[in-house]
């Protein structure tokens, strides 16, 4: 799964007698707040717990799925007259 852009990963390496070591340092970027009513917050916490993730990640997953549904609706709509004309245009 693609992680949201809330993490910055730094790779640090050094050598010691032909031995290379790599250390991964994870730095959390400061987040932001989203105001929701108590009932919605409880539902988000339950959903996150059921998914084994954080509330923030559950919101990110839900947002992505809603965006995909929106795109799907747009793609399933009939073509406009301009779109049909463009697709039927003679390329020669």
Image (cartoon, helix red, strand yellow):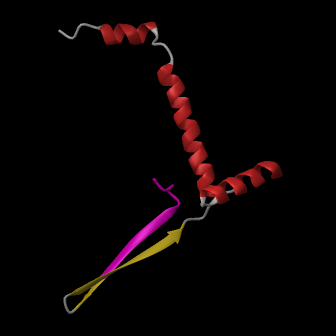
Q: Which residues are magenta?
A: 1-13
* Image spot of residue 90 (x, y percent): 24, 7
| Location of residue 7 with respect to 91 vertically, above or below | below
Q: Do we see residue 37 in this rendering? A: no
| Location of residue 29 with respect to 40 vertically, above or below | below
Outermost residue on the right side: it is 38
* Image spot of residue 50 (x, y percent): 65, 56
Please say whether residue 21 is one of the residues in the magenta stretch.
Answer: no
In the rendered structure, the answer to whether residue 92 lies left or right of residue 10 reads: left
Q: Could you tell me which residue is drawn at 81 percent across and 49 percent down? A: 39
Quadrant of the image occupied by residue 42:
bottom right
Please say whether residue 10 is one of the residues in the magenta stretch.
Answer: yes
* Image spot of residue 74 (x, y percent): 51, 23
| Location of residue 26 with respect to 54 vertically, above or below | below
Q: Could you tell me which residue is drawn at 55 percent across and 37 percent down? A: 67
Outermost residue on the bottom side: it is 17
Which residue is at the front of the view, 39 or 37? 39
* Image spot of residue 35 (x, y percent): 75, 51
Which residue is at the front of the view, 34 or 42? 42
Q: Could you tell me which residue is drawn at 50 percent across and 28 percent down? A: 72
Quadrant of the image occupied by residue 49:
bottom right
Q: Could you tell me which residue is drawn at 51 percent across and 30 percent down? A: 71
């Amino acid at each position: 799964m693609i992680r949201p852009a809330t993490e910055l990963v730094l790779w640090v390496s050094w050598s010691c007698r032909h031995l290379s070591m790599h250390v991964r340092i994870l730095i959390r970027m400061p987040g932001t707040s989203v105001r929701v009513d108590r009932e919605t917050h409880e539902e988000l916490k339950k959903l996150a717990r059921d998914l084994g993730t954080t509330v923030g990640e559950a919101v990110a997953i839900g947002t992505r799925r809603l965006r995909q549904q929106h795109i799907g609706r747009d793609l399933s709509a009939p073509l406009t007259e301009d779109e049909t004309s463009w697709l039927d245009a003679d390329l020669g």
